[in-house]
Image (cartoon, grey):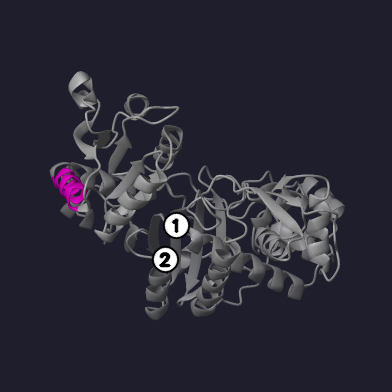
Amino acid sequence: MVVTAPTRILVVDDSPTIRRVVSSVLQRAGFDAVAVASGEAALQGCAVEMPGLLLVDATMPGMSGVELITRLVDEHPDAPPILLLCTRGDDLAAHDPSLRGRGVVDTITKPFSPEALLAVVQHTVEKHGAARATAEHTRVIATLAQIPVAEPRSRPRSPAHDFDDDEKTAPAVPRTMPTTTTSNPGQAIGVSLPSGFALIGDLAVIALPEVLQLLKFQSHTGLLAVDAGGLRFQVALEGGAVVALTAAERDGAPTRRAELLLGHYFVAPGLVDETALEVLLATPSLGRPLGERLLASGQISADDLRRTLGEQVQDLMVELLRARRGVFALRPGADLLPPLVVSPGWAIDGLLFEALRRIDEWGVIETEVPSFDACFVVRGAPDETGLSADERAVLLLLASGPSRVADVVKRSTLRAFDVCRVLYRLSVLQRVRRIDDGDGRGLVSDHAGVSTTPRESS
């Protein structure tokens, strides 16, 4: 089974009114519309995910629409069709016929009615969409073919192994996986699916909670690989329950999100001394995972390890569900499950309920803390009256001067979620003041989160 997303349209215009109106009209018509205010932002967005169609304002301050089109085509030869937004009397397209050769397929004159806008957009999508739909199928398949998936285990699961390698949040996996060109369901769309997969799809079409519920009801056992939000996740399932959830960067390296590394969950609450963990990580591991080494050294108990792993799994589930775009693939088979010493098996319903509750809370927090690049300062003299220990700690971090949310997370022992929740409360209490909204992507966007350099202790 292969599913792909509706046409994604990127609207590029420096006018907030145009962006809001055009996005609203396109979204009501069923398109996946995203709007940005500059050519620079458009290039950054296209580098992350190429849309199916661009609507570009011809005359923008800074990088003009023509400059954007030129750079886009130079950097991306497979750039999508472009509709040029022009003002009355602007015969730019007539004076510069080379725009046609650079992907401009039509122009729309401002002001325009919603009906006129939709007519041009729908005609363009119908005319140019077939080739791009095939390309989109191929993109999904190609991405899945790059997702590292753990090889079947030749040895039985054993108490001699547990969770994650020292600085990793994912087990060692091959960098590629084989594909097949033999009889294959993908032939229906002219592509070849990776072998051994029962289900693949696009998260923009089928939300991950629906996928996980399906796997729960059918009591699946195997490995669900997900490429989303800049990370690659692996969800190990046994009888429809989650027995392990790991994450790594797309290149297979440990995640650079320090707050997601297993060591952080030992250090932050004071279970393990940071210096002691640094010493442990600096010594040869002999292939023994971090949790096993901490247990053997007597620094943590089995209950500590079970609880800590549960916290990490829940946080990773939140991170996974926050990603609105990506691809997923299910590879069935009990032999794909990692060897675990403590594997209580987390019910999918419980993980989803808590993750979605936190995501809703992220939405509330975002009203005061709009992004991880937002900058805060203490309002007047620091006032710790009535504050909790966590709130006093964050207030103290801000006392040295203006700080971005991401920088506060780096310097705090709290998780990113807890830092943002504390900043929300401090802002509501008027103990801190926001002086910059940041990049505007939000806390729950496709690339939300804090890109940090992992502590050696993590």
The quadrant holding residue 127 is: top left
Residue 377 spot, x, y in % from top left: 75, 50
Say few, some or many: other residues with alpha carbon within 10 Å of mark 2 (under 14 / 14 to 19 / 20 or more).
Answer: many
Cβ–Cβ under 8 Å for marks 2 and 1: yes
Q: Main secondary structure of the magenta part?
A: helix
Residue at point 56%, 75% (across, down): 354
Mark 1 element type: strand
Q: Nearer the viewer, residue 457 or 396?
A: 396
Question: Is residue 277 within the magenta segment?
Answer: no
Residue at point 49%, 47% (across, down): 174
Residue beneath disc 1: 226
Relative to 339, say whether 127 is above or below. Answer: above
Read off the magenta span.
115-126
Q: Is residue 162 left or right of residue 3?
A: right
Q: Nearer the viewer, residue 398 or 381?
A: 381
Quarter occupied by the N terminus: bottom left
Q: Would residue 194 be visible to someone looking at this image?
A: no
- Earlier in the chain: of badge 2 and badge 1, it is 2
Residue 350 spot, x, y in % from top left: 54, 79
Q: How many marks?
A: 2
Residue 31 spot, x, y in % from top left: 27, 55
Question: Label for residue 208?
Answer: 2
Question: Label for residue 160?
Answer: none
Question: Is residue 125 within the magenta segment?
Answer: yes
Relative to 458, say whether 236 is above or below. Answer: below
Q: Amino acid at mark 1?
A: Val
Mark 2 element type: helix
Relative to 91, say whether 137 is above or below. Answer: below
Residue at point 31%, 31% (across, down): 58
Mark pair 2, 1: CA separation: 9 Å
Q: Nearer the viewer, residue 308 or 379?
A: 379
